[in-house]
Image (cartoon, grey):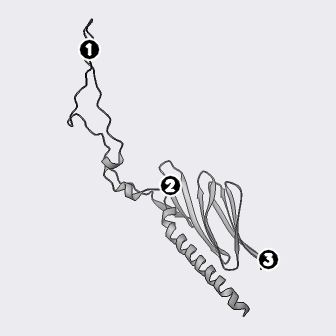
């Protein structure tokens, strides 16, 4: 009788956990790119994505001394309006490499972005670190019976705790000697 009361809650928790894992897996390719790119915009012709062509310059005829200025409106035709558009270039994602388990991309400005997924018995976390010393939690999904807690006192130091009674898994990531340093530990039993 007591276990049937928990069945709907356990089903909901399992469905929620499954949807989080599927969503995390689906978003990983997006997270691996250092800059957001809109592929729909990249496929449009250049004329559709550029600003409108500038108006042609207008010169007014000089008036003779003593003559009154007249209202003069220059005539323009389609031939005089030349759109200035940039040729379309296809945006390419920066190349990715792997360093010590981290997926690394380097932007045009030299900023390196490191992304890594951590899995332990307490749950799963995806963490991003940039070469300007910023550590960020992307996702954290606790395993059944665990709760997740994020602790970040400075921008370059992050700890993700997966806690259950008297037992924790800790994923600690920091920027150290020009690269990310990660450590996964278990406390209690």
Which badge, 3 or 2, is on the more N-terminal residue? 2
Dot 2 falls on a residue whose secondary structure is strand
Distance in Å between CA atoms under marks 1 and 3: 91 Å
Mark 3 or 2, closer to the camera: 3
Q: Which residue is mark 1?
A: 62
User: Camera-side residue: 174 or 47?
Assistant: 47
Mark 1 or 3, closer to the camera: 1
Dot 1 falls on a residue whose secondary structure is loop
Quarter of the figure with residue 99: bottom right
Q: Quadrant of the N terminus?
A: bottom right
Q: Residue at x 62, y 59 (%)?
A: 136
Q: Residue furthest top?
A: 66
Q: Is residue 100 visible?
A: no
**How far across and how far down the image is residue 149, in percent?**
71, 67
On residue 106, which mark appears?
2
**How far across and how far down the image is residue 51, in percent?**
36, 42
Q: Which residue is mark 3?
A: 166
Mark 2 or 1, closer to the camera: 1
Q: Is residue 83 above or below residue 102?
A: above
Distance in Å between CA atoms under marks 3 and 2: 41 Å
Which badge, 1 or 3, is on the more N-terminal residue? 1
User: Camera-side residue: 61 or 31?
Assistant: 61
């Amino acid at each position: 009788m007591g276990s049937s009361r928990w069945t709907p809650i356990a089903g909901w928790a399992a469905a929620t956990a499954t949807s989080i894992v599927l969503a995390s897996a689906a978003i990983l390719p997006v997270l691996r790119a250092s800059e957001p790119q809109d592929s729909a915009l990249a496929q449009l012709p250049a004329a559709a994505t550029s600003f409108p062509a500038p108006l042609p310059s207008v010169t007014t005829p000089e008036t003779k001394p003593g003559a009154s200025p007249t209202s003069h409106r220059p005539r323009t035709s389609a031939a005089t309006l030349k759109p200035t558009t940039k040729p379309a270039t296809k945006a390419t994602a920066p190349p990715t490499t792997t360093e010590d388990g981290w997926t690394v991309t380097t932007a045009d400005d030299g900023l390196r972005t490191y992304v890594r997924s951590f899995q332990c018995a307490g749950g799963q976390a995806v963490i991003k670190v940039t070469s300007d010393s910023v550590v960020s939690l992307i996702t954290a999904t606790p395993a059944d019976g665990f709760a997740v807690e994020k602790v970040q006192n400075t921008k370059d130091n992050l700890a993700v705790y997966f806690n259950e009674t008297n037992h924790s898994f800790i994923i600690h990531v920091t920027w150290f000697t020009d690269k990310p340093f990660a450590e996964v530990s278990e406390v209690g039993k």
